[in-house]
Image (cartoon, helix red, strand yellow):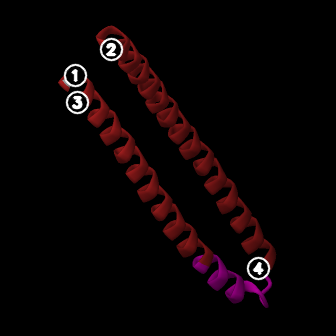
Amino acid sequence: MDTAITVIVSVIGVVIGFLSHLNEVSKQRKQARAEERERYDVEMRKYADSAVKQYAAERDFNHIRNELAQLRENMGVLLQENETLSDRVDGLKSELQHIKGGTT
């Protein structure tokens, strides 16, 4: 029974750690988005009345496209981590069910 409790505590620790990691990633992304938004606003004000308005728009588009590609990549990594942890949790649940079935 102590092993089952240890496994449960370990699973809970992994889940809490994963949630903490996701929360930190979310905070960092929000901060990065806020900083990028501020840079974008400053840039747009600077180029609003200039002849290089088209150049600035093309550059901003490329930044957004690159950021979107990075977000897609990050989302893939997070989904993969989530799937791995989900598989681990499912495996541990199955083991716990087996252990419970064997002790009753």
Please name the residue shown 53% across and 66% down the image.
Answer: 30
Cα gap from disc 4 to disc 1, whole angstroms: 71 Å
In contact (CB < 8 Å): disc 3 and disc 1: no
Can you tell which quarter of the image residue 56 is in? Answer: bottom right
Cα gap from disc 3 to disc 1, whole angstroms: 9 Å
Q: Which residue is mark 2?
A: 99
User: Disc 2 on helix, strand or loop?
Assistant: helix
Can you tell which quarter of the image residue 72 is in? Answer: top right
Q: Is residue 31 above or below residue 73?
A: below
Cα gap from disc 2 to disc 3, whole angstroms: 13 Å
Cα gap from disc 1 to disc 2, whole angstroms: 9 Å
Q: Which residue is mark 4?
A: 52
Mark 3 or mark 4: which comes first in sequence? 3
Q: Is residue 4 above or below residue 64?
A: above
User: Disc 3 on helix, strand or loop?
Assistant: helix
Cα gap from disc 2 to disc 4, whole angstroms: 69 Å
Give neighbour class at mark 1: few <14, some 14-19, many 20+ (Cα, 10 Å): few
Q: Amino acid at mark 2?
A: Ile
Please name the residue shown 43% across and 28% down the image.
Answer: 89
Front position in the image: 69 or 26: 26
Give neighbour class at mark 3: few <14, some 14-19, many 20+ (Cα, 10 Å): few
Specify the segment rendered in magenta: 38-51
Please name the residue shown 18% across and 25% down the image.
Answer: 2
Front position in the image: 83 or 104: 104
| Nearer mark to the viewer, of 4 and 1 | 1
